[in-house]
Image (cartoon, helix red, strand yellow):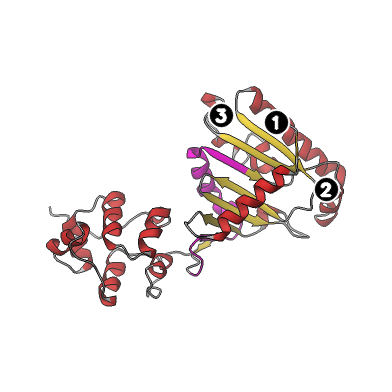
């Protein structure tokens, strides 16, 4: 049976990859088609059918012998490839008639770096863990960190390759200094005793020392400023949420931020993390 008429349906994560987003932003349809082939296995014939072109025309575009310049052709391509709205916006098009994303996550087309917003950390947990399992660098900025990396069933701890003792992944963790005035203030904000909050920080440090003893490349630091941002970085992707009076970081909306060639958000958050480390005390 011919597969030429089978709809092309790329996984959502493929549209979020930096190289795909750069191709869309540059309106490089040849590169877009190559990415479609890479991530969906679609032939030139299938791409042609989906986008209302001939196979010969698709071949010319992929091989650089023809460029796409007409708006209606861009629209046909976006519709035929079922581009999500943020991909359409990068291509310079309006949102599609039907939203592809719903539920706990939605796209922010106006900010190419911010590819998704989750209602809370638990809505992003599966994607965070997927990223953490393949990362080479893991940075964590937290208050006590028990739910992120301290406990056995925490969000990130199980993602470290236990059979290798966590080797191959460089981990840096920033925790709020349990002896600081900032911790006392933060405890009051969330209605918890300073003693309890400080005990949680110290427990996380103790559990992270166990990872170090197992051979994990891990560094743990204490910072002394009032926490504002909660951050998880896996290579070129960040998951960012905020602390405020009355709620903890995992209750905040979580922003998925990806590194782009000229975007300020990823660079700014990474610079902030490094600056906090520069002024922090290493404990592990």
Q: Position of residue 213 (x, y in %)?
A: 66, 22
Q: Nearer the viewer, mark 2 or mark 1?
A: 2
Q: Which numbered disc flags the more N-terminal residue, 1 or 3?
A: 3
Could you say which quadrant of the image residue 81 lies in?
A: bottom left
Q: Is residue 99 left or right of residue 65?
A: right
Residue 76 versus residue 257 in the image, above or below: below
Residue that badge 3 annotates: 166
Tell whether position 130 is magenta. yes
Mark 2: secondary structure: helix
Q: Which residue is mark 2?
A: 183
**Contact check, label 2 and label 3, Cβ < 8 Å:** no
Residue 162 % position (x, y): 55, 27
Label pair 1/3, CB-CB below 8 angstroms: no
For the record, the magenta segment spans 110-139
Q: Which mark is residue 175?
A: none
Write the residue at 53% across / 43% down.
129
Between circles 1 and 3, the one closer to the viewer is 3
Q: Earlier in the sequence, mark 2 or mark 1?
A: 2
Find residue 155 and report its horizontal and vertical position in percent.
60, 42
Disc 1 target residue: 207
Residue 55 among those drawn in magenta: no
Separation of marks 2 and 1 at Cα, in angstroms:
20 Å
Would residue 154 appear left or right of 47 to someone viewing this image?
Answer: right
User: What residue is shown at x 61% (from left), y 50% (from top)?
Assistant: 270
Q: Nearer the viewer, residue 138 or 245?
A: 138
Q: CA distance from mark 1 to mark 3?
A: 14 Å
- Quarter of the image where the C terminus is located: top right
Q: Is residue 91 above or below residue 184?
A: below
SS at mark 1?
helix
């Amino acid at each position: 049976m011919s597969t030429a008429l089978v709809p092309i349906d790329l996984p959502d994560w493929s549209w979020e990859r930096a190289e795909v987003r750069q191709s869309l932003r540059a309106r490089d349809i040849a590169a877009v088609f190559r990415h479609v082939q890479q991530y969906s296995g679609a032939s030139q014939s299938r791409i042609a059918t989906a986008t209302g072109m001939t196979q010969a025309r698709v071949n010319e575009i992929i091989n650089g012998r023809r460029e796409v310049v007409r708006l209606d052709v861009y629209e046909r391509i976006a519709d035929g490839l079922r581009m999500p709205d943020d991909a359409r916006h990068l291509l310079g098009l309006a949102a599609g008639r039907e939203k592809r994303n719903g539920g706990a996550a939605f796209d922010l087309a106006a900010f190419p770096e911010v590819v998704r917003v989750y209602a809370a950390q638990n809505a992003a947990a599966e994607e965070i863990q997927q990223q953490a399992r393949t990362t080479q660098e893991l940075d964590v900025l937290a208050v006590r960190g028990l739910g992120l990396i301290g406990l056995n069933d925490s969000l990130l701890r199980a993602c470290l390759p236990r059979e290798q003792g966590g080797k191959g992944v460089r981990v840096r963790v920033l925790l709020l200094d349990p002896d600081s005035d900032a911790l006392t203030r933060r405890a009051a904000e969330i209605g918890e005793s300073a003693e309890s909050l400080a005990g949680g920080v110290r427990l996380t440090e103790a559990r992270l020392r166990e990872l170090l003893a197992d051979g994990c490349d891990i560094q743990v630091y204490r910072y002394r400023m009032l926490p504002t941002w909660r951050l998880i970085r896996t290579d070129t992707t960040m998951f960012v949420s905020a602390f405020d009076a009355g709620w903890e970081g995992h209750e905040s909306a979580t922003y998925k931020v990806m590194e782009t060639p000229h975007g300020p958000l990823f660079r700014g958050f990474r610079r902030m993390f490094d600056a906090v480390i520069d002024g922090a005390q290493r404990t592990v």
